C-alpha cells in the first residue's frame, strides 16, 4: 500500500486513506485505538459530510467500529472520544447509541471517562427561558468510552509501563479536567489536546505498543505516540489534514527529518 502512505518517520506512519476501505494494516495487529470520529453536527470538514441523517450516521459508525474490531488484537483496547449527547438538529443520545452499537459489533464495555473540557461557551440556548415549558439541559462535557476486544487483561506487548504513581492515581479517577484545544491554533475544526491521547496511551498500553487513530485529523494522537515511545498509525481521508499532521509531527513532535521517508506526492 505504498501509494497510500503519505508520511513515515521512525515508528510513525500516516496513510491518506479511508478507514472503511484501507488495507494498509493486517487484522489483529493493533494494541490500542484512540480516536474522536466525526460528530455529525455540521462541522465543515474538507472531505466528510457532517450532515448525515442520524440513521445514516449510526450506520456509518457501525461500519467503522466493525473495521476497527477486526484490526485490534484479542487483548486490544479502544478509547473512543465522543459527545455525551447533541442538540444540533434534534436531541440525540449519542453516547448511549454508539456504545450500544460498539457492543453489538463485538466490542466489550469496560468503563467511561468523563472529560470536563471546561468549555461552558458551548451553551447556546436554554430553551424556554425561566420556564418549565421546554427547557434544555446541556452538559458541557465529552466522554471517552473504554472498550476491549476479547479479554481485558493485557498479555501481549513489552510489559513495560511508563506511567507514574501520581498519574495512575489521578487518571484512574474517571473524571478528567483539562482544557480543550484551540481550533484557531491548530487550524482544524475539531482538534483534541495532546493530553487526551497521552493519558489513554500511558494508562492502557505498554511502551512499544502499536496505536491506531482511524480519524487522524490534525495528528494529535501521533504526537502523543512520539512523546510516549509507541508506534503510531494514522488514517486520514483528507490529504490536507495529512499534511497538517505531518507538519505538526515535525514541529511539535520534533520528529527527526533526517529519517523521513516521504511517500510519492508528499510535500
Image (tube, grey):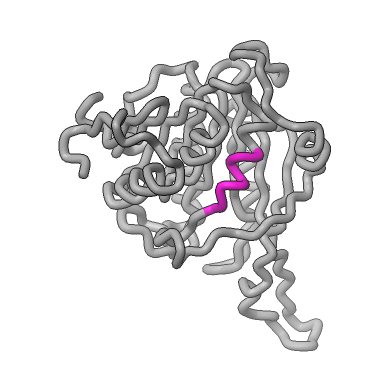
The magenta stretch spans residue 194: yes
Q: Residue at x 74, y 37 (%)?
A: 111
Task: Name the residue furthest left.
Answer: 265
**Residue 13: % across, % down:** 36, 31
Range of magenta residues: 192-199
The magenta stretch spans residue 162: no
Q: Quadrant of the N terminus?
A: top left
Residue 189 lies left or right of residue 143; in this view the side is left
Residue 252 vertical placement versus 189 (above, below): above
Q: Is residue 20 visible?
A: no
Q: Nearer the viewer, residue 2 or 144?
A: 2
**Residue 198: % across, % down:** 60, 40
Residue 11 is drawn in which quadrant? top left
Q: Nearer the viewer, residue 183 or 267?
A: 267
Task: Name the residue furthest bottom.
Answer: 130
What secondary structure is the magenta-colored segment mainly?
Answer: helix
**Residue 156: % across, % down:** 61, 12
Q: Residue at x 49, y 51 (%)?
A: 55
**Residue 168: % across, % down:** 78, 34
Q: Residue at x 69, y 32 (%)?
A: 203
Residue 250 is drawn in which quadrant? top left
Residue 267 vertical placement versus 180 (above, below): above
Residue 187 lies left or right of residue 107; in this view the side is left
**Total marks in image:** 0
Amino acid at each position: 500500500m505504498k501509494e497510500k502512505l503519505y508520511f513515515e518517520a521512525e515508528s510513525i506512519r500516516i496513510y491518506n486513506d479511508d478507514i472503511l476501505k484501507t488495507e494498509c494494516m493486517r487484522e489483529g495487529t493493533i494494541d490500542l485505538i484512540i480516536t474522536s470520529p466525526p460528530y455529525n453536527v455540521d462541522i465543515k470538514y474538507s472531505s466528510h459530510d457532517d450532515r448525515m441523517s442520524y440513521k445514516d450516521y449510526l450506520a456509518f459508525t457501525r461500519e467503522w467500529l466493525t473495521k476497527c474490531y477486526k484490526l485490534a488484537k484479542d487483548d486490544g483496547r479502544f478509547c473512543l472520544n465522543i459527545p455525551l449527547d447533541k442538540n444540533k438538529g434534534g436531541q440525540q443520545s449519542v453516547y448511549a447509541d454508539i456504545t450500544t452499537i460498539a457492543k453489538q459489533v463485538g466490542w466489550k464495555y469496560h468503563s467511561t471517562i468523563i472529560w470536563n473540557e471546561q468549555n461552558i461557551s458551548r451553551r447556546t440556548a436554554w430553551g424556554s427561558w425561566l420556564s418549565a415549558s421546554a427547557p434544555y439541559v446541556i452538559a458541557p462535557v465529552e466522554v471517552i468510552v473504554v472498550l476491549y476486544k476479547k479479554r481485558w487483561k493485557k498479555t501481549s506487548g513489552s510489559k513495560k509501563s511508563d506511567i507514574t504513581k501520581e498519574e495512575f492515581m489521578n487518571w484512574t479517577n474517571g473524571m478528567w479536567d483539562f482544557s480543550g484545544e484551540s481550533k484557531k491554533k491548530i487550524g482544524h475544526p475539531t482538534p483534541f489536546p495532546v493530553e487526551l491521547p497521552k493519558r489513554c496511551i500511558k494508562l492502557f498500553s505498554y511502551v512499544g505498543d502499536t496505536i491506531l487513530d482511524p480519524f487522524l485529523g490534525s495528528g494529535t494522537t501521533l504526537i502523543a505516540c512520539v512523546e510516549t515511545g509507541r508506534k503510531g498509525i494514522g488514517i486520514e481521508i483528507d490529504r490536507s489534514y495529512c499534511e497538517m499532521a505531518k507538519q505538526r509531527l515535525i514541529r511539535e513532535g520534533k520528529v527527526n527529518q533526517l529519517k523521513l521517508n516521504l511517500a510519492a506526492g508528499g510535500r
